[in-house]
Amino acid sequence: MIIAGPLWGNFISRYVELHIPDDVTEPHLGEGKMPSFGFSLALILLPLVLVGLKTIAARFVPVGSTAYEWFEFIGHPFTAILVACLVAIYGLAVRQGMAKDRVMEICGHALQPAGIILLVIGAGRRLQAGAG
């Protein structure tokens, strides 16, 4: 697949021609609206760092202590990704001056497919538990 995809794309591009509609324009984003490279990189690395801290803390922090429980919580993959998403929403939308209604609309559209997937998975698990 890794080799076939680019080869197929190269082959089929000779026969398929796509035209961009005239009413499509590139959005104009000023330098102030674009996130910095450092912020973008930090968003990518944040969940990895949180999970890594959990792994390191599990080795050095006494089991059962408050610090251990905190690292277990913050380093759980779901929590780490949630924290990264909240930082991304703040840094890429709220801090840039986007209206809260628009932020909620974007988040709603982004989470809708995930909600459907979770619904199907949950229903499948429930049916599996009932059958077994």
Image (tube, rainbow, N blue to C red):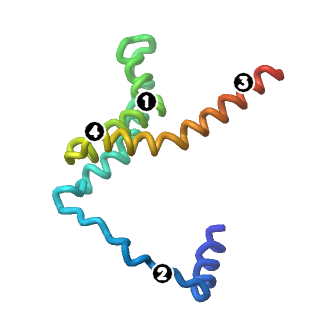
**CB atoms of marks 2 and 1 within 8 Å:** no
Place of residue 126 in the rendered image (x, y in percent of width and height, measured from the top left)? 72, 24
Residue type at mark 4 is Lys
Q: CA distance from mark 2 to mark 1?
A: 43 Å
Comparing 131 with 69, the one in front is 131
**Tag on residue 92?**
none
**CB atoms of marks 4 and 3 within 8 Å:** no
Report the residue marked by disc 3.
126
* Viewer-side label of 4, 3: 4
**Residue with the most extreme bottom position:** 14
In primary-sequence order, the first of circles 2 and 1 is: 2
Q: CA distance from mark 2 to mark 3?
A: 48 Å
Residue type at mark 2 is His
In primary-sequence order, the first of circles 1 and 3 is: 1
Q: Residues within 10 Å of mark 3 (few under 14, many from 20)?
A: few
Q: Residues within 10 Å of mark 2 (few under 14, many from 20)?
A: few
> Relative to 72, is 8 above or below?
below
Q: Secondary structure at mark 3?
A: helix
Report the residue marked by disc 1.
79
**Tag on residue 19?**
2
> Relative to 18, is 88 above or below?
above
| Screen quadrant of the N terminus | bottom right
